[in-house]
Image (cartoon, rainbow, N blue to C red):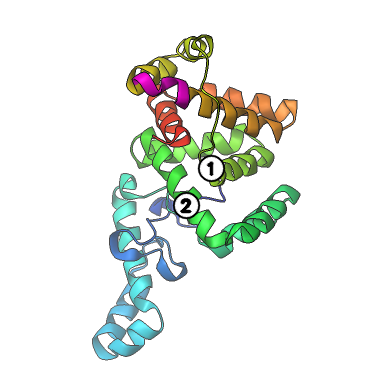
Amino acid sequence: MSNELTISNPGAGSAGPATDVGGAGGAGQGGFASLPPNATRKAEIEAIMRTDFARYEDEGLDKEYRALLQGELEAANPERANPVAPMPADASRTVLCGSVEGQKLVSEWERMGGFRVILAGVQKDVGEIVKEAGNALHQKAFMERFSLSVPVEVEVALMDEFASGVPWAPPASQGEIDLFATTAAGKIMVQLWGAEAAEKVGILRKRAARLVDALTEDEEADLWAWFGGLDTHVITKAYRKLAGG
């Protein structure tokens, strides 16, 4: 969904986006994502693996080898890539600190209990929403559209809102529920929530108000223009995540 949450492998060429951290083969652990196919390097690592297995593990060559294998899979079939692979915490911190808003967020998360822990939770939530876009190619397109559609201030505000958790909110009125249900996604969620609709819509309204309070009018317009263009099933996933189920 954003560059702070996911990582692609620049220079990977046809290898595509990064593999899942801790996923197939755990290629992302230790700083490696998928790597461009490289038969020479692969052969070098295989030789070390056969002759000096301790070195193979101690130098992290096992992770590099799995990343090379994943790169080969992705080159043959781009849909095997995983665009929602979490960006390592240190890299996320560096990217966020490239803006004043991001610096403030990093500092706040450290005070709240630890940047790494909070970031991991946000990455998990956002990754689950992005996966609703479809296969790997659709997920990649989803994140590219997001990055092109909204400024960094919106990205940071969304990350902060996801980290804030589900708040208590006064139940929505029947009029507010009816208004929410005028959209396709809203109608689906009101039917799904049933008797809990007032509580859930109230939570969403509070979170939306809290989010836009952190944005300028132009930033808010960019946010809703992007959100309004999402597929219905992606929006319903976001609603469930933000409303707590």
Query: x, y (%) of residue 173?
Result: 52, 14
Mark 2 nearby-residue class (10 Å; few <14, some 14–19, many ≥20): few
| Amino acid type, mark 1 | Phe
> In which quadrant of the rendered view does residue 139 lie?
top left
Between the residue at mark 2 and the residue at mark 1, the CA separation in whole angstroms equals 8 Å
> In which quadrant of the rendered view does residue 37 lie?
bottom left
Q: Residue furthest left?
A: 50
Q: Nearer the viewer, residue 91 or 124?
A: 124
In the picture of the structure, the residue carrying the numbered disc 1 is 162
- Residue 146 shown left or right of residue 14 in the figure: right
Q: Residue at x 39, y 42 (%)?
A: 128
Secondary structure found at label 1: helix
Name above or below for residue 181 compared with residue 122: above
In the picture of the structure, the residue carrying the numbered disc 2 is 121
Answer whether labels 2 and 1 touch (C-beta < 8 Å).
Answer: yes
- Residue 44 shown left or right of residue 98 in the figure: left
| Amino acid type, mark 2 | Gly
Name above or below for residue 110 compared with residue 140: below
| Residue range (magenta) | 194-200
